[in-house]
Image (tube, rainbow, N blue to C red):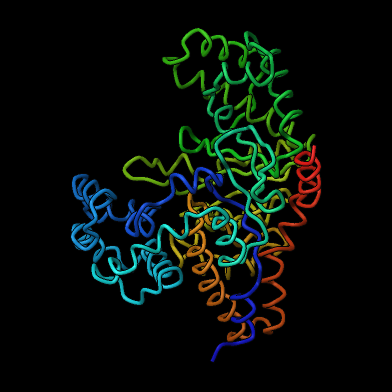
Amino acid sequence: MPTELAYFISTNRMIDTHEHQPGEEQWVRDGAKDILNDLFGNYQRDDLIAAGATPDELTRAFDHTNPDIAGRFALLARAWHAMRHTGYAEKVRLHARRLYGVQEITPETLAAVNHVVAEYRQPGQRLRLLRDEARLDHIQTDFFSYRVVPDPSGVDFFLYDLSWAGFSNGQINFEEVARDTGIAVGNLKQLRDAMAAIFSRFGPAAIAVKTQHAYNRTLQWQPRSDADAARALETVLRWPRTADDSARLCLGDWCLARGVELAIQHNLPVKIHTGYYAGNDRMPLDWVRPANLCGLLKAYPRARFVLMHMGYPYGEELVALAKHYANVYVDLCWAWSINPFASMNFVRSYLHAAPINKLFAFGGDCFSPTHCVAYSLQTRKWLTRALQAEVEAREMSEQEAIAIVTQITRTNQQACFDIEGRRAYLREALAK
């Protein structure tokens, strides 16, 4: 029989701190064209590849111009069987049940409901799926750009991060910067001025600063002098495509520090990807350890750092950082799907080690509202298991567990992010 805790978690409206959702026009135009691309069009492909699916099998299976859904799914049968118990596969099952009414995934059942996909790509469905099906208060989206403007399809609902990844990588699009700021960067002072101009123009609309530079370089950070950064910038400007990694690393460290300083000035938390990579065959684990950020955390005690993805597989390392550093917040975005069992255990470990006011429960980290619905269901399922186990172990009462759910799904985020302030700014900007 469902408990009061389980019911509360299943119906509670969560704040979603991390997405890569497309805009309204892009979703209607470019969203999944058939059920196979909808169900498997996210991280599921990574597990299919890890399970041995060949490039040819994947190309043919996801060719939406071929109407033979059953025949195409058969190409994935071997790999699907191998990955069927992973967190990514669980998302497929939850997705199929909730949005397509499919209880058992077979070639025949998928083919029978393929027509439903088009219904989800109608105008307004993006907002409905995220707000009503996933039961989200709002979503915070990294659209891979520092340009943050109001989203008229849901100005209070669709909030956006100011992307700082290119700067943190030392891979700056100087032409874009010049267009947006009027500053043609030729020296370090001009770069500093351009970055300040970016924050002045786009920072008031942003909900946070986001960087996933761990995909291109180590998270290990060190302070860089202006003199060293100036030399690195000169190298990058002179050889924009062939500058050596050491120059980009130096410039990236300097730009990341300036970005953190500007984030403090504009009252924006700084989100940093830690841990696991999406994709296959290119993950140096030493780069992605959360502990690599200790120097940055210490250097900027006034900044609010949101360390993402449970730092998987370095979960306990992340718990230690949250326990030690007052300016560290922990975000479980994406983690529930990477490894739901580890995420469940992480929540229990965190509860007994670090302050509960610094944990964020949910972010789908995906590119489709239909996927986000499934990931929200997955989060609710495993969060229920984690807290129900605590109640059954008599570590807390059911009412205490419900209070914790409220904290980690809404209250903590409201305290960290200036949500209402950003919403007010966006409404006013859109009305002009």
Q: Which of 100 and 169 is in front in this view?
A: 100
Q: Is residue 291 left or right of residue 313?
A: right
Query: What residue lies at 76% left-to-right and 43% top-to-bottom?
Result: 426
Q: Position of residue 195 (x, y in %)?
A: 69, 23
Q: Where is residue 279 in the image (x, y as percent from the top left)?
A: 37, 45
Query: What residue lies at 74% left-to-right and 50% top-to-bottom?
Result: 417
Q: How many labels does the image show?
A: 0
Q: In this view, does 188 lie to the left or right of 251?
A: right
Q: In which quarter of the image is residue 359?
A: bottom right
Q: Position of residue 395 (x, y in %)?
A: 65, 81
Q: Which residue in the rendered view is the most extreme toward the bottom?
A: 1
Q: Is residue 229 left or right of residue 385?
A: right
Query: What residue lies at 59% left-to-right and 77% top-to-bottom?
Result: 387
Q: Which of 237 and 35 is in front in this view?
A: 35
Q: Quadrant of residue 303?
A: top right
Which quadrant holds the N terminus? bottom right
44, above or below 112, in the image: above
Q: Nearer the viewer, residue 154 or 90?
A: 154
Q: Is residue 319 left or right of residue 217?
A: right
Q: Where is residue 416 in the image (x, y as percent from the top left)?
A: 74, 52
377, above or below 325, in the image: below
282, above or below 82, in the image: above
16, above or below 182, in the image: below
Q: Nearer the viewer, residue 14 or 334?
A: 14
Which quadrant holds the C terminus? top right
